[in-house]
Image (cartoon, rainbow, N blue to C red):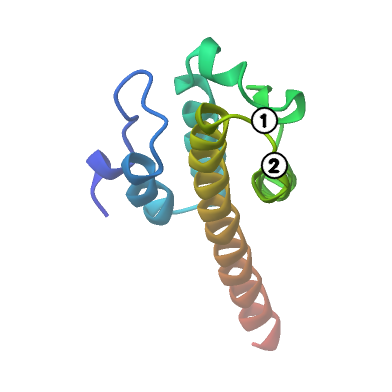
Amino acid sequence: MHGAQLSPSPPGSILFDEWRGRIEAAPDVEQLVGLVRAYLHAWPPEQLNRLPYDLAAVALPDSDDILSRALLASLAELKGGGSLAEYVVLREMALTFAAAATRLRLLRSARQSRVDACEDK
């Protein structure tokens, strides 16, 4: 793994393509949570204002919030009903949180496999 992959994106960058590699390279849950927090803080306020209130919060207390935010973003994207500008920013968030949720599940699964292997010894 390369440290550059986990470095923050340029200020204000909310593009999924610019965060995807770092999300997929996160080596543990704690770093993934930190990365998602950095992603949320990269959002300019005027773009956050285009999102539903529950998605626009930049606070991310823990890793479980990644899963709930991924679900909320996907549901909001599927529901639609907003302007094209709202859809574009919502799609970036939905894609990014979906990737983070997938990575979180993989990290938790790997951790559980290690625990199980230790218990079998």
Q: Which residue is nearer to you in this view: 84 or 59?
A: 84
Of the numbered discs 2 and 1, the one sitting upstream in the chain is 1
- Three-letter code, disc 2: Arg
Image quadrant containing the C terminus: bottom right
- Give coordinates of residue 22: x percent, y percent: 36, 46
Q: Which mark is residue 60?
A: 1
Instruction: Please name the residue that numbered disc 2 is placed on.
Output: 69
- Give coordinates of residue 82: x percent, y percent: 65, 32
**Vertical placement of residue 88 versus 117, above or below:** above
- Give coordinates of residue 35: x percent, y percent: 47, 36
Q: How far apart, in angstroms, are the residues tagged by discs 2 and 1?
A: 9 Å
As helix, strand or loop, the secondary structure at mark 1 comes to: loop
Q: Residues within 10 Å of mark 1 (few under 14, many from 20)?
A: some
Report the residue that reaches farthest toward the bottom: 120
In this rendering, position of residue 17 left or right of residue 27: left
As helix, strand or loop, the secondary structure at mark 2 comes to: helix
**Vertical placement of residue 8 versus 93, above or below:** above
The picture quadrant where one finds residue 10 is: top left
- Three-letter code, disc 1: Leu
Q: Which residue is nearer to you in this view: 79 or 114?
A: 79
Image quadrant containing the N terminus: bottom left
Q: Which mark is residue 51?
A: none
Looking at the image, do the residues carrying marks 2 and 1 touch, with CB atoms under 8 Å apart?
A: yes
Q: Residues within 10 Å of mark 2 (few under 14, many from 20)?
A: many
Residue at 41 percent of width and 43 percent of height: 16
Residue at 57 percent of width and 53 percent of height: 98
In this rendering, position of residue 97 left or right of residue 119: left
The mark lying in front, picked from 2 and 1, is: 2
Residue at 73 percent of width and 46 percent of height: 79
